[in-house]
Image (spheres, rainbow, N blue to C red):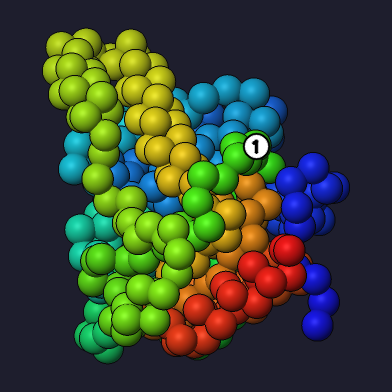
Amino acid sequence: MALWFVREGFMANNTNAVESQKHELLSMYRRHVGMGSSYALVDFPDHPNVGDSAIWLGEIALLKKITGRSPRYVSTYANFDAAAFEAACPNGVLFIHGGGNLGDIWPSHQIFREELLARFPQREIVQLPQSIKFRDEAGTKHFAQLLERHPNFTLYVRDNPSYEFAKLKFACKVDLMPDSAFGMGQQRRSPATRDALLLLRTDSERAGYDMAPFASIREGKIVDWLQDCPRTIRAARARRRLVKIVSGADSNALRVRWYEWLANSRVKRGIAQLCEGQIVITDRLHGHILCVLLDIPHVALDNDYGKVSNYINAWTHKYPSVRIAKSSASALKEYNDALIRAL
């Protein structure tokens, strides 16, 4: 079998995987904006999940590189203000944050997306790369009906099942593109402090793997990344109060900086978690993606509907330091094989 564990100090394994996807993303974004273009980016992920913050940072990095400027308007789904958006960005593209919430698993984001489509039928709206999962056909039909009435909506998806689904169900422009977190580029890895770090889901997308096999991992640590550190929580409260008392363009500029700070804080926390392990086992898609950006050898398990393996099959299957496992027992075997190869 081919060696897939690379010792610290060797040439990076991840250059091709990272740069090829970043190149695809730059080409995609340039379809919609150029140097000096005005644009808005909405649905900021104001929650502790590290993966969504990594996507946001990648989106901002790519858009700034192409346009040379920050978004004219940003918001979460909860604080979106239509009048403020139109005043700040009367003509630009409306980008919707990418991720894994197109469907009915995370309804608040889908409701917001649908409201934007209904409210701005003449605006160019671009949905940045998503995975699609509707558990209820009624939700699919409702979204399809909204898309039929919007003449200028582009949907980017990040895996082949989502692409085939969208082409079949939705009357809009659809294309397959990488996850925008690759816009962050390669990241620096700090030295590991233990043999294994297990980043495993505790939310509604958890597949319910048997945890017993992982008990045999020496110096293993099981974590998720759904809780902010106390410093971030304190800063969040203070900055939210400040944003509320500043108005107009100054408010948006402040919010742009605040969102970037918050996303950076969360991604740094996630990177620190992953770097603890000499090898990582994860069922989170951005556990996998950040491991690629950091060049950390890892074993990837799936979430409950195949999101992780679907992405790997589409984009990162040639990256030499990842293995896909279908059970906790097979993940343990891949992990042990990696330790043997590292000797």
Using the image as rendered, state which of residue 203 and residue 62 is in the foreground.
203
Residue 58 occupies which quadrant of the picture? top right
- Would residue 145 be visible to someone looking at this image? no
What amino acid does circle 1 point to? Arg
Q: Is residue 85 left or right of residue 288?
A: left
Q: Is residue 246 left or right of residue 23?
A: left
Q: Secondary structure at mark 1?
A: loop
Give coordinates of residue 333: x percent, y percent. 56, 82
Using the image as rendered, state which of residue 264 and residue 165 is in the foreground.
264
Using the image as rendered, state which of residue 236 and residue 148 is in the foreground.
236
**What residue is drawn where x is 38% and y is 57%?**
221
User: Within 10 Å of the Cα at label 1, are there few (<14), some (14-19), or many (20+) other Cα atoms?
Assistant: few
Give coordinates of residue 61: x percent, y percent. 59, 34
Give coordinates of residue 265: x percent, y percent. 39, 31
Where, quadrant-wise, is the N terminus in this rendering? Answer: bottom right
The tally of labels here is 1
Q: Which residue is mark 1?
A: 188
Where, quadrant-wise, is the C terminus in this rendering? Answer: bottom right
User: Residue 87, relative to residue 45: is it above or below?
Assistant: above
- Would residue 10 be visible to someone looking at this image? yes
**What residue is drawn where x is 59% and y is 65%?**
298
User: Residue 276, relative to residue 113: is it above or below?
Assistant: above
Residue 209 occupies which quadrant of the picture? bottom left
User: Residue 228, relative to residue 144: is it above or below?
Assistant: above
**What residue is drawn where x is 65% and y is 77%?**
337
Give coordinates of residue 234: x percent, y percent. 19, 23
Q: Is residue 144 left or right of residue 192?
A: left
